[in-house]
Image (tube, rainbow, N blue to C red):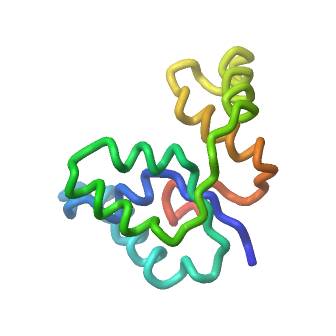
Amino acid sequence: MEIVYVESSVISYITARPSRDVVVSARQALSIEWWEYKREQYEVYIPELVIEEITSGNPSAAQKGLDIVKTIISLELTLEAKELASLLLSEGAVPENSPEDALHIGLAAAQGFVGPILCSPDEL
C-alpha cells in the first residue's frame, strides 16, 4: 500500500464552504472525492502540524477538520524535524518566507517518509 503524507490544504478544501473560484472549487471536489473514495487505497499520515493548523481557526470548521482526521495516524513534530527545517531554510533549499513548508519537509524526512506529500489530490 502506498504511503501518503496529507498536508492541511487537503483538509481545508474538504471543510471549506464551496468556492466560486473555478480552480478552488475543482480542488475542493477532488479533495472530497479522494478522501471519500480513494483514501482507503493508501496508508495515510497527517503531521501534528496539520492538527495545529486546522484547530487554529473557526471553532466549527476546526471541529469538522478534527472529525475528518480522527482516524489518521499523526506524526509528531520532533527536534530533529525542527533542525532539518532550520537547515533547509538557512541553506536556501526552502524560501525563508515558507517556514511551514520547511517544517513539513523536515518532519517527513525525520520520519523516513518516502511517499508523496499530498497538498491536493490532483498531485497523485
Residue 117 drawn at (x, y percent): 63, 54
Residue 21 drawn at (x, y percent): 23, 55
Q: Nearer the viewer, residue 122 or 3?
A: 3
> Is residue 8 placed above or below 42 in the rendered structure?
above
Which residue lies at the image location 40% right of the left edge and 68% below the top edge?
Answer: 68
Rendered-image quadrant of the N terminus: bottom right
Asked if residue 116 lies left or right of residue 29, the reply is right
Q: Nearer the viewer, residue 26 or 17?
A: 17
The image quarter in which residue 110 lies: top right
> Is residue 109 placed above or below 68 in the rendered structure?
above
Asked if residue 58 lies left or right of residue 119, the reply is left
Which residue lies at the image location 63% right of the left edge and 52% below the top edge?
Answer: 75
Q: Which of 27 and 36 is in front in this view?
A: 36
Which residue lies at the image location 63% right of the left edge and 40% below the top edge?
Answer: 77
The image quarter in which residue 27 lies: bottom left
Which residue lies at the image location 33% right of the left edge and 57% below the top edge?
Answer: 23
Asked if residue 37 lies left or right of residue 15, the reply is right
Residue 31 drawn at (x, y percent): 42, 68
Count of numbered badges drawn on the protein: 0
Asked if residue 110 lies left or right of residue 34, the reply is right
Rendered-image quadrant of the C terminus: bottom right
> Is residue 56 placed above or below 24 in the rendered structure?
above
